[in-house]
Image: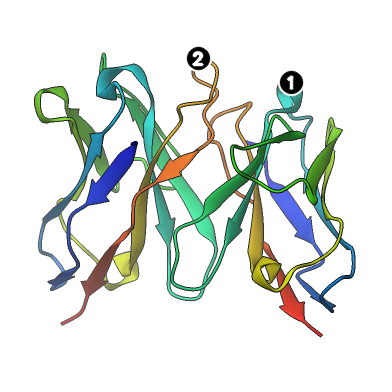
Amino acid sequence: EIVLTQSPGTLSLSPGERATLSCRASQSVSSSYLAWYQQKPGQAPRLLIYGASSRATGIPDRFSGSGSGTDFTLTISRLEPEDFAVYYCQQYGSSPFAFGPGTKVDIK
Amino acid sequence: EVQLVQSGAEVKKPGESLKISCKGSGYSFTSYWIGWVRQMPGKGLEWMGIIYPGDSDTRYSPSFQGQVTISADKSISTAYLQWSSLKASDTAMYYCAISLGGYGDYVFFDYWGQGTLVTVSS
């Protein structure tokens, strides 16, 4: 069973700054089957990235994903006010398709 | 338009049974995996399991195997999550979600239901 860890737990930044979120897997994630989700309070999660680097439909290009093997990164190039939220990674290469514990991006 | 509409909030007592639902529309219900995700109050997302409504192939997380049952009725495009004996620790928001963009049984979730809040309290 693949376990995901995310760092940092909380990231305090200002609008306009760059955010770099890390997701590390306990074993290699096959074929880079790694997704990222954004969740705001009181809302269902929203898919941002799949296949480690492909943006989902309607996702702005300030969101980008990279990585392979066991190390993956979500980058938000310039934070907009609506980007302050919790971000989760998920691997879907090996069942169970677990989520990471999340990174909260809050306003500094 | 793809939609997943979940049943309403539930308040139950420990030991009671419960079945919550998720109705899909706007896509071919039998052709895509549908899954359930738990979110306990103030906590993160937990992958519970998935079902392929076309043939009822079901996969569970070891953490939830034996604790819940995932099923689907393709005649009414509805998936279910059920408990035979609820515990206070089952109190959580439960989301259903589907994978329209995945490959085979490599399943991420690109559409989500609105969530069903289950409260278990004596």
- In which quarter of the view is residue B116 placed? bottom left
Q: CA distance from mark 2 to mark 1?
A: 13 Å
Q: Is residue B57 visible?
A: yes
Q: Residue B60 location in percent, x, y?
A: 40, 35
Residue A91 vs residue A41, the one in the foreground: A41
The answer to whether dots 2 and 1 both sit on one chain is no
Residue under pointer 1: A31
Of helix, strand and loop, which one carries label 2? loop
The chain letter under disc 2 is B
- In which quarter of the view is residue B100 placed? top left
Amino acid type, label 2: Gly
Q: Can you say which quadrant of the picture contains the N terminus of chain B?
A: top left
Residue A5 vs residue A60, the one in the foreground: A60
Amino acid type, label 1: Ser
Residue A60 vs residue A99, the one in the foreground: A60
Q: Is residue B109 left or right of residue A15?
A: left
Q: Which mark is residue A83?
A: none
Residue under pointer 2: B104
Q: Residue B8 location in percent, x, y?
A: 17, 62
Q: Is residue A49 left or right of residue B117?
A: right
